[in-house]
């Protein structure tokens, strides 16, 4: 297929992501799974290389546009106002549009950096992979240890007794550790005793992720008593070029780390980069998270196209790797060009859709949107993974609610991937599985 046709498929995927991004908690990989199943059933509709570029555009658009529901459809109530993310703070300060644009600028900067690094990827990354491959297990173990050690007490120091103040400070830390351990146990069980039908094995983790992250978010929205204030559509953002460069630089650093290392997500990479660069500014956080998210999703998929590397990182590359293998440098450069054009299109779509989101939250209660999303999530889980998948999602939801109720990091739920894969890399996975009676 001609490169211009392939780029056209990518742009169509970006436009499709604009519809997906409106739905809170609906992940792009869930939609991609449905599209791949449809393509396998009707292979004459779209060629395999066209489907691959469609997925690239879908991921590129989603990495930029999913900022909209995370800002506009997750308003905090008064009990959590001091621990919410900066995007939610901006929303309650009538600046949700500005938060969305800042995050989009970070994503645009992240993809510009990917474009600048593209000529060197084929020379540097294969060497880097050979150097790091034997050490991945202990690097991931250190990341897990740092994640837990970097939790901090969130108590108010208002309890009347010393023991009460001690519990007030330590309950969020304990909740974070328990969340990590329980999600890790769930990950080990899923890996060795999957309940997902074999024909949709690539969606094995889908019900767990829906329960750990999506459903608690939707339930929180349904129970929230917050009211979204009228929003102001700003004509500019409060960020100098130097601040944008600093935020994008930190986000790219975290995103590249997450894209290259297995099971390290963009959130974890952005968190590590933020700690390393001592970020304390909400604007820096929004910019860096936008860049980290874009580099993680898009860069992780581009690694699959790099000649001589073909590194499978992230859910999209894993799903596509069984259908298509990019062999030539021309395919790689076509993917790079498609990423650049799709990223630019996604940013302009973000500006328009963010204005639409401002109008939407002023007219429609976001709880109704969340209720529809909950029904949609349950239908997707049952359709793709059966009733066994719904059982996994229910158990995962109980774990995913712990950070919400006890104000610890939701990132601790990533134990579902970090624990089993690190154990397997260290050669301990089968041993633990036997202890648990899974083998």
Image (spheres, rainbow, N blue to C red):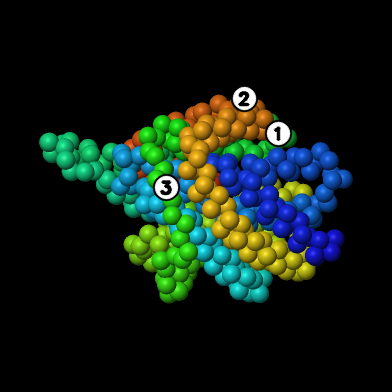
Q: Residue at x 35, y 39 (%)?
A: 77
* Rendered position, 118 above or below 199: below
The Cα–Cα distance between marks 1 and 2, rounded to whole angstroms, is 14 Å
Give how far across and how far down residue 188 sits, in percent.
52, 37
Instruction: Indicate left or right for 45 with 254 as reference.
Output: right
Q: Residue at x 55, y 49 (%)?
A: 356
* Rendered position, 20 above or below 370: below
> What residue is shown with label 3?
230
Circles 2 and 3: CB atoms closer than 8 Å: no
Q: Residues within 10 Å of mark 1 (few under 14, many from 20)?
A: few
Of tags 2 and 3, which is closer to the observer? 3
Give how far across and how far down residue 328 sits, in percent.
78, 66
> What residue is shown with label 1?
198
Q: Mark 3 or mark 1: which comes first in sequence?
A: 1
Q: Mark 1 or mark 2: which comes first in sequence?
A: 1
Quadrant, the C terminus = top right
Local SS, label 2: helix
Instruction: Indicate left or right for 352 with 239 as reference.
Output: right
Q: Residue at x 21, y 43 (%)?
A: 156
Quadrant, the N terminus = bottom right
Which of the two residues, 148 or 33, is positioned nearer the viewer here? 33
Q: Mark 2 or mark 3: which comes first in sequence?
A: 3
Local SS, label 1: helix
The Cα–Cα distance between marks 3 and 1, rounded to whole angstroms, is 48 Å
Question: Residue 387: which numbered mark, if any?
Answer: 2
Q: Residue at x 63, y 33 (%)?
A: 380
Local SS, label 3: loop
Instruction: Indicate left or right for 276 with 197 as reference.
Output: left
Circles 3 and 1: CB atoms closer than 8 Å: no
């Amino acid at each position: 297929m001609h490169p211009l046709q392939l780029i056209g498929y990518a742009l169509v995927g970006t436009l499709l992501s604009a519809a997906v991004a409106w739905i809170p908690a609906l992940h792009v990989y869930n939609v991609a799974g449905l599209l791949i199943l449809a393509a396998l059933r009707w292979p004459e509709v779209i060629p395999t290389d066209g489907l691959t570029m469609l997925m690239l555009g879908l991921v590129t658009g989603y990495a930029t546009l999913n900022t909209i529901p995370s800002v506009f459809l997750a308003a905090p109530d008064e009990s959590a106002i001091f621990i919410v993310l900066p995007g939610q703070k901006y929303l309650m300060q009538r600046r949700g549009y500005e938060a969305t644009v800042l995050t989009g600028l970070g994503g645009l900067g992240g993809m510009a950096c990917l474009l600048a690094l593209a000529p060197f990827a084929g020379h540097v990354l294969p060497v880097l992979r050979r150097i790091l491959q034997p050490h991945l297990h202990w690097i991931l173990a250190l990341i897990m240890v740092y994640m837990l050690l970097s939790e901090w007490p969130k108590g108010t120091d208002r309890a009347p007794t010393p023991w009460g103040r001690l519990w007030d400070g330590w309950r969020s830390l304990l909740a974070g550790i328990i969340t990590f351990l329980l999600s890790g146990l769930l990950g080990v069980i899923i890996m060795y005793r999957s309940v997902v039908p074999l024909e949709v094995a690539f969606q094995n983790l889908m019900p767990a992720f829906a329960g750990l992250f999506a459903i608690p978010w939707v339930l929180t929205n349904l129970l929230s008593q917050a009211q979204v204030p009228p929003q102001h559509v700003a004509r500019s953002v409060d960020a100098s070029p130097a601040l944008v460069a600093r935020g994008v630089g930190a986000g790219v650093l975290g995103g590249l780390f997450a894209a290259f290392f297995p099971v390290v997500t963009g959130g974890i990479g952005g968190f590590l980069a933020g700690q390393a660069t001592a970020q304390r500014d909400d604007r820096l956080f929004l910019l860096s998270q936008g860049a980290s998210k874009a580099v993680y999703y898009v860069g992780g998929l581009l690694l699959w196209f790099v000649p001589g590397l073909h590194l499978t990182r992230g859910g999209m590359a894993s799903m596509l790797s069984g259908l298509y293998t990019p062999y030539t440098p021309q395919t790689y450069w076509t993917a790079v060009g498609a990423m650049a054009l799709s990223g630019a299109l996604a940013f302009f779509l973000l500006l328009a859709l963010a204005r639409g989101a401002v109008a939407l939250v002023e007219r429609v209660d976001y709880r109704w949107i969340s209720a529809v999303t909950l029904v949609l999530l349950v239908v997707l889980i049952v359709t793709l993974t059966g009733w066994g998948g719904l059982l996994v999602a229910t158990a995962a939801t109980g774990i995913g609610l712990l950070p919400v109720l006890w104000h610890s990091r939701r990132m601790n739920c990533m134990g579902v991937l970090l624990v089993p894969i690190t154990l397997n890399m260290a050669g301990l996975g089968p041993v633990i599985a036997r202890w648990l009676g899974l083998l």
